[in-house]
Every structure is written in structure tokens, then in C-alpha cells.
Image: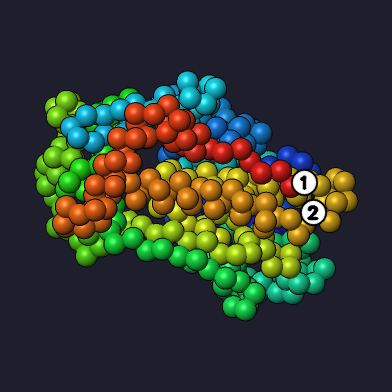
Amino acid sequence: MKTQVAIIGAGPSGLLLGQLLQRQGIDNVILERKSGEYVLSRIRAGVLEQGMVDLLREAGVERRMDAEGLPHDGFALAFDNRHVRVDLAELTGGKRVMVYGQTEVTRDLMEAREASGGQTVYEADNVQLHDLESDAPWVTFEKNGETVRLDCDYVAGCDGYHGVSRQTIPEDRIKTFEKVYPFGWLGILSDTPPVSHELIYARHERGFALCSMRSETRSRYYVQVPLDEKVEDWSDARFWEELKCRLPDEVAAKLVTGPSIEKSIAPLRSFVAEPMQYGRLFLVGDAAHIVPPTGAKGLNLAASDVSTLYSLMCKVYHEGRSDLIERYSETCLRRVWKAERFSWWMTSMLHKFSEEEDFGARMQQAELDYVTGSRAGLTTIAENYVGLPYEALE
């Protein structure tokens, strides 16, 4: 087999990159070690920045998003039994976010790829990357008991934190930065109407809580829990009771409860790998960086990587600009670290870090009082939440 760009991973970032390249006449093959059904079963984030919405439009997959997605012009920060609205549109000159589940984004991209005739190999086992520092890298994988070779010009590593792409880079050629938080998020999905038409991020003495949604009839809620908690110990009744405790009284009174259809605990961490490229391998999304979900940046940060790599490949194949290849990592990382900072800051301001009512808790209170009482503070939150501008390659 031969292609121009080999894409490792058929999650939303790999599929989005593939679709964008396909529309520009740049040949690509996607390799995915799981089945398509498994990829679609993963429940992930659902808040899309303006930049990602625009990128999905450029990829030609906006029809269902426009029909079913929920545009949001703001969200709320809750503390001291009250909540303050952050007016995104007013503070950013009309920018907004879109609530549309990652599963639905993935489904739209899979359908578009199938319609375009793009090649995706699911259940590709033992994927290995070769000669990445040469002008002719190649990939091997196993399918139906046979080893297949895929020759290519470039490799896009869109295969997540545990994927083979980053692990292929020699240890002395990459540096990682990591912060592990001492808690996780217990989340449930329920077929109940959301308690609010906009997201609510709540700080409470018992811990953080988040009220989110997937649609007007499906809600997604989270509460902060210690890392040693087990999902089995949390009945639906216990979860709803704890969530109500952490919300302002007027919000809790409107909460509609019901059976959970999914329940899980996700640990929180910040992670960045530098550089994000090695020879002709480019790391994209979770393969290069992880953010705590507090700032809704994970999927959106992957989309900005995709945008940068897509622009680079268009420059290479349409203009012969191979001189820009070395700028991929530094271009992406400028935006990555700003998103890491925002996610870390939101996490630090809203979560319970100690059982004691200590100095840190007082600082959290002062921070919330300041940023919600200052237009400058609210603008800082709004600008980061809707998404900072994509970095240009030159």
C-alpha cells in the first residue's frame, strides 16, 4: 500500500484530519486498532470552541451539528450559594461555543469518510512506525493474520495518550511535563432535561460539581471525588443527593433526576510532550497533550493541532513549502501551553484540595470574587473559554 499521509488513529482528530486532506486532494489512509463500533461507543466531551466549529464546517460535516447542536453564548460560575453568568458573546465580540457530543462529531466524520471513499482500516493490529527521520517513512500493521506495509510521505499520530506514535520517539528526543491531580470526576449521563440551558461550574466546600448536557433531553453531570472512590459505591440516589448539595439552592430545586445510562470516574491530569514532531511524524491531540476537563479544552486542542497540520500539508503539497515542516511543533505548543494554563487555572480555582479550611481555600474564594466582579476578569475567562485564535505557521 502507498499513500501521502498515514494517519494513526480513527478518533475525531484522525478522522477530521483525513476528511480535510481528502477534500484538498491529499491522499491519506487511517489505521485504527479498534473497531468502528468501539470508537463510537466512547463517551467524551461535548463543548466545541468556535474554531473547531469552523473547522468542521470546512470539512463539510456541519449539517447535523447545525440541526442538533446547542449554541451557547455563556456559562455560569457558582459559589457561595449563588451563580454569576459569564456572557461569552458580549465579552468576546460575538463568539460562542457549541454543545455537540464528541460521539456525534465522530459519527458525522465516519459517515463523511465513507461517502468520500477514503480508506480506513479498522482492527489494524501491531501498528509500527519505521524510518521516521528519512524521506520515505513507512508503517506496518497486521490485518487478518497478514503483515501489511504502508509507504507514505508523512505520519500523523492521532492515536491518543497510550498510542504507538509517541512511544516510537526515542526517549532522548522527547521531554514530558506532567501534573497529576489528587482527585477525579465521577460523571453520569441521564435522559433528563438539563438543570440549566447553559453549563454551570460550581465550587463548594464538599468539592467541585459541573452541570452539562448533550441535548435538550440528555444531561451530563459530574462531582469531584477522591481517586480511591469506586463507581460501584455510588448509587444513582447517592449521586443526585451529592450533586444537589454542591449547587446553589435555586439550581438544586430545579434538578430533574432519573436513572443513569452511563457512570464512570475519570482521573485528572495535565500532560505535555515536547517537541510534537520527530522527523516526519507529527503528534496530534492526546498523543501530545492532556488537559483536565475543567476548561473544556481536550477535544478543542486536538482540533487546533489538526488545523495546523492540515495547513502544513496543504503548503507542502500545493505550494512545495517543505521549509515549514519544522515549525509544526513550536506553532502548536504556543497554543497548547496557553490552554494548559487555562485548564490548570480553572481546576485550581474550583476544586477542593484539602480537608482543612486553609490558605488555599481563601485564595480560591478571593480569585472567584475578583474575576466575577471585574469585567477584565470575566473577559479573560470568556476569551479562553471560546478558544484563543489558531496560531499561524508563518
User: Contact (CB < 8 A) between labels 2 and 1?
Assistant: yes
Question: Which residue has dot 2 on it?
Answer: 324
- Residue 147 in view of the camera: yes
* Relative height, residue 220 to residue 275 (above, below): above
Up/down of 147 relative to 331, above or below: below
Q: Is residue 273 left or right of residue 251?
A: right
Q: For the point 45% across and 30% down, which residue is it?
A: 376
Which x, y percent locates residue 268?
A: 36, 57
Q: What type is the residue that disc 2 sits on?
A: Leu
Q: Is residue 363 above or below residue 129?
A: above
Residue at coordinates 20% horizontally, 54% vertically from top-left? 358
**Residue 255 appears in the rendering:** no
Q: Position of residue 8 (x, y in %)?
A: 61, 60
Pointer 1 residue:
394
Tell me the SS state at disc 2.
helix
Distance Cα–Cα, label 2 vs label 1: 8 Å
Q: First in sequence: mark 2 or mark 1? A: 2
Number of marks present in the image shown: 2
